[in-house]
Amino acid sequence: MIAPARLAAYEILSAISAGRADLPTAIAHRRESLRDDRDRALAADIATGVQRQRAALDYLIAHYAKRPLPRLDDEVVEILRLSAYQLLHLSRVPASAVVNDAVKLTGKVGKRSASGLVNAVLRAISRNRSALPLPVRPADVSDREGALNYLAITLSHPRWLAARWLDRIGLARTEAWMQFNNRAAPLTLRANTLKLSVLELQQHLSSHDVVTHRGQFAPAALIVDDGHPLRGPDADAGLFVVQDEASQLVTLLAGDRPGRLALDACAAPGGKTTALAAAMRSDGVVIASDIRDRRMALLRQTVQTTGAANVRLVQADILATLPFQRRFDTVIVDAPCSGLGTLRRDPDIRWRREEADLPALAAAQRRMLQHAAAVVAPRGRLIYATCSSEPEENERIADTFTEDAPHFTPVDAHSVHSQLPPGVIDARGHLRTEPDRDGLECFFGAVFENAGRRSDW
């Protein structure tokens, strides 16, 4: 019998490679059929690990198979990937069990003729695990080709992205970013201060055997060290929201006092919306909008669970003129982007994105910012944010906006919130978190103030 977790991992990886689902969706869909929590965890671990290490795994598979991957059946490639990952990164699993299951799975998916190849490749990888023939970091940092081979293959990132980062930030920082992306991300919570303080949440979780420590930058962040807060009796009580620490910092750009009327224009899943609601308490209203039905349902669930009574939901498309008559004191545009700043948490993005995607994304982001600006009140603030590492989606958007909307003036983020750490604000006054410096995903945020009058519109 093939281990259920390995079979599930194969099906998850096959769905991703075929373009039927992204990693989180494929895991969520397949885990429903696994009864044991340990199998669920192992299947997710394998599938996520393969996405992080895919280029290195593919290089080793081609090397020991003595043929390029396109000459292997897709089913065989997925079996070899997940099995090689287990051999190299999950040493608690006996190698013989991994190889035997791989051979059985090869037959199960109708590729029995490839069983001998699968067996030989995996045994060769297992034998050579202490001296794998992967490209090494070049001693000469000016060796561009050697550096790209090391970054793209051994550290498993797209070559086009490796080249961009290498040229922009150098070999040492690129290496550090990629090593960060290849480590598992901790579970990070934001305390729902509508219901309890951060300290009260930490103490409450501790009483349920969940050990946490405070985040380094975001004031309401708790990082889980041990335990399972999402499985406990209070998992659906709305005491916390699962939200990356860098993402939590974006809401602080709204300031200590966001005003009486705020708009979160790309709101799902609701982390920033409910943080705004908590900051405003009962003194104001947050309008939360998104476009797709599924995202609106997720947003509604978050708002209801957290008890954010001052939130109103409006389904709207920010790529079109927004349907609001009133002007907002604060507008947040956490724009859909490439996601290249979140490769640690979403490793499959690195293989789904192409450099050619960036111009279209940037064009859409410019339209979103223009439409959002039209509903900002005089003296109100507009916040633009992404989870991208790339300048086209970040400072270039901010620069273009200030050229196109001269009545909006940039605001130095140092001045906007008493709890916003100065270490994550760059020389231009933008929020910028960086993996090698901060140990956080790459997020960007820019703040603008409407210095114009109604007659300017």
Image: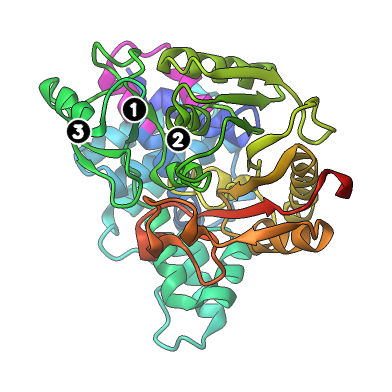
Which region of the structure is painted magenta?
25-44
Q: Dot 1 corresponds to which residue?
A: 193
Residue in the picture at 29% in, 59% down? 128
Side of 194 where 288 appears, left or right? right
Where, quadrant-wise, is the N terminus in this rendering? Answer: top left
Residue in the picture at 60% in, 53% down? 447
Dot placed on the residue nearer the N-terminal end, 1 or 3: 1
Q: Where is residue 38 shown, x and y percent of the image?
A: 26, 22
Q: Amino acid at mark 2?
A: Ser
Side of 262 where 33 appears, left or right? left
Quadrant housing residue 269:
top right
Q: Amino acid at mark 1?
A: Thr
Q: Nearer the viewer, residue 4 or 431?
A: 431
The residue mark sitting in front, 3 or 2, is 3
Quadrant housing residue 189:
top left
Q: Amino acid at mark 3?
A: Leu
Q: Nearer the viewer, residue 172 or 224?
A: 224
Tell me the SS state at disc 1.
loop
The numbered mark at residue 287 is none
Dot placed on the residue nearer the N-terminal end, 1 or 2: 2
Q: Dot 2 corresponds to which residue?
A: 115
Relative height, residue 385 to residue 7 (above, below):
below
Between the residue at mark 3 and the residue at mark 2, the CA separation in whole angstroms equals 56 Å
Q: Where is residue 358 shown, x and y percent of the image?
A: 73, 54
Q: Do labels 1 and 2 touch, CB within 8 Å?
A: no
